[in-house]
């Protein structure tokens, strides 16, 4: 009797633990009692950029209530981007005529879902959560300013054109991407994987997961992972920024030495 | 030095090389040069094709396979540029461009920057790191040319002094013109016009020299037959070497004060003359944002009347100093110099510059000028097309626009 009670207690504690830190044993949980909460966890939680970095794979996993669909949004920190617009000059030449700075827009945004987004939530709701498949809602908080020295104000229609241009460029670049039906759900566990391009922005990435049932958001969880320079890359990058004179001088000395070295090597070999 | 038997043998060998070993040495180095030259030409042609946007099906497939094979293990993350690129592609690019720079004495910046941007490096670090790469390539090239006796140090330093004054003044002029508006537009137009004019003039002159030499050699052959018939005097008169290029502006330069002799360049002129040319080129470089070699070499050959090879060597010599200056400015004001990127390009380009300098050795001056003229025209046409053809995308991401 005591043994059974202990077992029940242990099971209860275990499922409690699972709620706090979801693990592979989530299936053990008895359905119906306490529905599994939505959780999200990126692995690894830190991506180090060293000299041989060529992009990284970040696995995003977690738990979700049984039967719910999952949507995950991964976005890099809001940043500012400079855009240039070409126009006609003197009637026959095409060149950059205007520049604008767009602030408060993530450089990278990946959307993953277990079913087509349009079928999960209404368009308004998708836009409100900034997870609409066109990414247009991501730009809701964006500001557009002229990047020209004279700071001529930009009209609302021009601003809209710039935002659309930015959106197109990011999608073309593969930095805004949509992966519908790319989350595998097994029981109460779900998983997906983000392949981070080598030139992805640096900083703390926000991962937001939504559980959706019957056109309703029934759960939300957030987590983050960092993408940081480390090792030689960090050393050189920091030195170039903070110690520019020494960095410049050193680079030049090495460049001249290398040039003369190769020159010597070759003229020694050539024997003319 | 410790005299082990091997050491002594090597020393004797070095001090008094036997005819045999020297011959073997030479032929080996010639072979090396030949192999490297072949490689260089292939890379240059491929790079130019790709740069010009010519889509050769086989080529793009080969590039893709190449990238796939080596991309997995031989990429490097560039700390300042913030992108990951293939090592071999970088070294290959450096080699091809270095070859051109050794051959013509042009910095190759006009070619390297667009190529770097094509492989995904943002323009600001591409421009800055390229200038750092030019430091190495031009030192290597200048060293090679110096050993061949192609550098007039005095002329180079005079041009440099003018270039520094002109460049400094040019930066102020740019600031003034920018305030007037529509500046970039006029810069581009001027650039295309100047480049086009230089290209056309060079081609016209060098092709006419080529034809003249050809006619001359035919005439010479005919005269050899004439000799047998006794026309010795006539032969001597007709086969006397023609003065290939007379020195222009002679009467003007002879009247200027500060006359001096530029021994290597084989000219006597006032210091003021090359200084003024350096000043003008420096001014143009600052305004148009393009390396000096392009304008300096034609200016030296056509205005100063310097032999092409000396012009190339001297231009490289002064480029060492101008590129050092630019690199330093870029590092300090923009922090956009990517050292690993520059070094990798340098490895390729320093070797390429040596090969280029050697490739140029058997070529005649006018042959070099034909090739450079064609290259200048190709760049002009590309720029012109960029200006005239409507863009595919109106609004683009702009990282900070660089100098070139």
Image (cartoon, coloured by chain):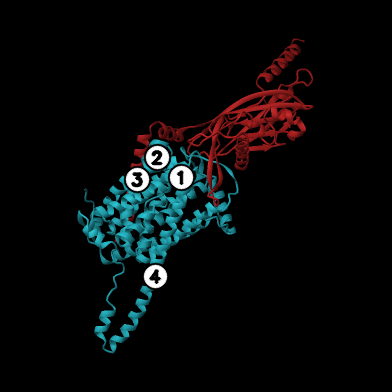
Chain colours: A red, B cyan
Per the model, the C-alpha gap separating discs 1 and 3 is 18 Å
Q: Residues within 10 Å of mark 2 (few under 14, many from 20)?
A: many
| Residue drawn at (42%, 64%) of the image | B203
Query: Do tag 2 and tag 1 residues touch (Cβ < 8 Å)?
Result: no
Which residue is denoted by mark 1 in the rendering? B183
Q: How crowded is mark 1: few (under 14 residues within 10 Å), some or many (20 or more)?
A: some
Which residue is denoted by mark 4 in the rendering? B208
Which residue is denoted by mark 3 in the rendering? B167
Report the label total: 4
Q: Is residue A55 left or right of residue B310?
A: right
Query: Do tag 3 and tag 4 residues touch (Cβ < 8 Å)?
Result: no
Q: How crowded is mark 4: few (under 14 residues within 10 Å), some or many (20 or more)?
A: few
Query: Do tag 3 and tag 2 residues touch (Cβ < 8 Å)?
Result: no
Give SS at disc 4.
Answer: helix
- Name the chain letter of the residue that bears numbered label 1: B
N-terminal of the two: label 2 or label 4?
4
Per the model, the C-alpha gap separating discs 2 and 4 is 42 Å
Q: Which of marks 4 and 1 is in front?
A: 1
Give SS at disc 1.
Answer: helix
Point out residue B173 in the picture as x, y percentages from the top left corner. 38, 43
Q: Can residue A270 be seen in this view?
A: no
Nearer the observer, A139 or A264: A139
N-terminal of the two: label 4 or label 1?
1
Q: Can residue B273 be seen in this view?
A: yes
């Amino acid at each position: 009797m005591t043994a059974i009670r202990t077992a029940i207690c242990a099971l209860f504690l275990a499922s409690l633990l699972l709620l706090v830190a979801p693990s592979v044993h989530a299936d053990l949980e008895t359905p119906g009692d306490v529905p599994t909460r939505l959780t999200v966890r990126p692995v690894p939680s830190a991506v180090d950029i060293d000299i041989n970095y060529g992009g990284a794979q970040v696995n995003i996993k977690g738990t979700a209530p049984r039967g719910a669909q999952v949507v995950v949004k991964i976005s890099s920190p809001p940043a500012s981007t400079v855009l240039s617009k070409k126009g006609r000059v003197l009637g026959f030449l095409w060149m950059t005529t205007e520049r604008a700075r767009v602030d408060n827009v993530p450089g990278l945004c990946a959307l993953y879902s277990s079913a087509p987004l349009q079928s999960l939530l209404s368009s308004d709701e998708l836009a409100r959560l900034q997870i609409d498949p066109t990414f247009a809602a991501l730009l809701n908080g964006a500001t557009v300013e002229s990047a020209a020295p004279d700071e001529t104000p930009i009209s609302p229609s021009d601003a809209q054109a710039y935002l659309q241009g930015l959106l197109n460029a990011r999608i073309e670049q593969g930095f805004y991407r949509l992966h519908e039906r790319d989350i595998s759900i097994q029981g109460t566990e779900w998983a997906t994987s983000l392949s981070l391009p080598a030139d992805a922005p640096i900083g703390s990435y926000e991962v937001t997961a939504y559980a959706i049932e019957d056109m309703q958001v029934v759960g939300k969880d957030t987590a983050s992972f960092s993408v940081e320079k480390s090792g030689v890359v960090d050393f050189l990058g920091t030195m170039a920024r903070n110690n520019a004179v020494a960095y410049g001088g050193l680079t030049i000395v090495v460049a001249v030495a290398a040039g003369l070295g190769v020159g010597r090597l070759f003229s020694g070999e050539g024997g003319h | 030095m410790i005299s082990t038997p091997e050491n002594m043998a090597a020393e004797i060998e070095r001090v008094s090389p036997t005819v045999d070993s020297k011959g073997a040495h030479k032929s080996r180095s010639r072979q090396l040069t030949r192999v490297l030259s072949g490689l260089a030409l292939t890379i240059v042609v491929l790079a130019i094709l790709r740069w010009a946007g010519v889509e050769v099906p086989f080529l793009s497939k080969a590039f893709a396979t190449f990238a796939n094979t080596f991309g997995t293990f031989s990429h490097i993350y560039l700390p300042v540029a913030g992108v990951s690129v293939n090592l071999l592609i970088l070294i290959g690019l450096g080699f091809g461009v270095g070859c051109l720079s050794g051959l013509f004495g042009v910095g190759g910046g006009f070619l390297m920057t667009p190529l770097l941007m094509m492989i995904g490096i943002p323009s600001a670090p591409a421009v800055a790191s390229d200038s750092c790469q030019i430091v190495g390539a031009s030192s290597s090239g200048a060293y090679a040319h110096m050993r061949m006796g192609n550098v007039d140090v005095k002329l180079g330093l005079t041009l440099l002094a003018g270039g520094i004054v002109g460049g400094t003044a040019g930066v102020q002029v740019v600031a003034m013109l920018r305030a007037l508006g529509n500046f970039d537009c006029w810069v581009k137009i001027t650039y295309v016009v100047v480049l086009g004019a230089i290209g056309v003039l060079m081609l016209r002159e060098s092709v006419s020299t080529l034809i003249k030499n050809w006619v001359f050699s035919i005439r010479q052959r005919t005269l050899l037959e004439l000799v047998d018939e006794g026309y010795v005097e006539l032969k001597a008169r007709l086969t006397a070497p023609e003065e290939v290029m007379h020195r222009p502006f002679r009467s003007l330069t002879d009247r200027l004060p500060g006359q001096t002799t530029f021994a290597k360049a084989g000219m006597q002129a006032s210091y003021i003359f090359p200084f003024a040319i350096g000043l003008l080129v420096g001014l143009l470089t600052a305004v148009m944002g393009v390396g000096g070699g392009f304008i300096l070499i034609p200016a030296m050959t056509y205005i100063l009347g310097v032999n092409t090879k000396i012009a190339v060597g001297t231009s490289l010599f002064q480029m060492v100093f101008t590129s050092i200056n630019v690199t330093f400015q870029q590092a300090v004001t923009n922090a956009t110099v990517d050292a690993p990127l520059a070094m990798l390009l340098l490895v390729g380009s320093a070797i390429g510059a040596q090969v280029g300098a050697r490739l140029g050795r058997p070529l005649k001056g006018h042959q070099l000028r034909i090739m450079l003229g064609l290259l200048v025209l190709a760049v002009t046409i590309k720029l012109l097309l960029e200006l005239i053809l409507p863009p595919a995308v109106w609004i683009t991401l702009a990282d900070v626009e660089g100098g070139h």
